[in-house]
Structures are given as structure tokens and as C-alpha cells.
Amino acid sequence: MPDAEALRVQVRLSGLEHPELHAALGALPVRSRAERLRQLALLGLRGLSVAPASTAAEAQTATVADTAAPDPRRAQLLAALHLDD
């Protein structure tokens, strides 16, 4: 019996609807595609959870803060984005 926490998702991606994503995933080996899609989904979720800066100055401050004190979770996610073929 499968783990209750595990999800299996089948994705059909049309090159006509999402050409950039289709090209990026199509260039990867078959077994790397699911991992890359998970990484991109995590980035999207992370982007949704961050409140947009109301001014350019606030955006600059946030960028400097990210550089000055790196978040270990962010560093781990960025490191995972580099796939080895």
C-alpha cells in the first residue's frame, strides 16, 4: 500500500501552450524531468509566499538582505537547481 503522504501526479505538457517549459523539460533526461518540475514548482510557491515590494527601494533592501544573511533553505533550493546529467 502506498504511503499516505506520497502523491503521484501525471503531467501532460503541450509545447503549444507552454513552449519555454516544454523545451526546458524536453532537453532533460527522462528521469530528471520530474525532479526539475518539482524544483520549478517550489520556486513558484516560494514566489507566491513572498509579499511583493511596494517600492523599488523596498525591493532593493530585500535583495541586499537576502545577500547579507542567506537563508539556509534558500541556499539548499538554489543548490538543488543545478542538475547533473
Image (cartoon, grey):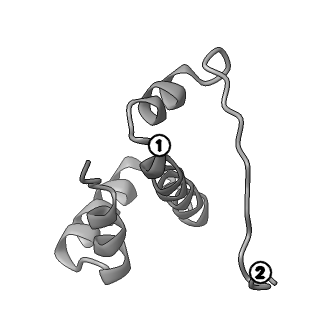
Q: Is residue 26 left or right of residue 78?
A: right
Residue 9: in sight, yes or no?
yes
Q: Tell me how far mark 1 sits from mark 2, CA to CA.
A: 23 Å
Q: Residue at x 31, y 79 (%)?
A: 71
Discs 1, 2 touching: Cβ within 8 Å = no
Q: Where residue 44 sits in the image (x, y, percent)?
A: 55, 54
**Element at label 2:** loop
Residue that protrudes farthest toward the front in the picture:
1
**Who is closer to the viewer here, 71 or 54?**
71
**Who is closer to the viewer here, 27 or 38?**
27
State whether residue 15 is above or below residue 28.
Answer: above
Q: Give the amino acid type for the residue marked by disc 1 in the picture.
A: Val
Q: Where residue 37 sits in the image (x, y, percent)?
A: 53, 50
* Residue position for label 2: 2
Residue that protrudes farthest toward the top in the picture:
16
Q: Is residue 26 left or right of residue 17?
A: left
Q: Quadrant of the N terminus?
A: bottom right
Q: Where residue 42 sits in the image (x, y, percent)?
A: 53, 61
Q: Where residue 51 sits in the image (x, y, percent)?
A: 56, 62
**Who is closer to the viewer here, 9 or 63?**
9
Q: Residue at x 28, y 69 (%)?
A: 66
Q: Residue at x 24, y 53 (%)?
A: 84
Q: Earlier in the sequence, mark 1 or mark 2?
A: 2
**Element at label 1:** helix
State whether residue 74 is above or below residue 23.
Answer: below
State whether residue 54 is above or below residue 77.
Answer: above
Residue 61: in sight, yes or no?
no
Q: Give the amino acid type for the residue marked by disc 2 in the picture.
A: Pro
* Residue position for label 1: 30
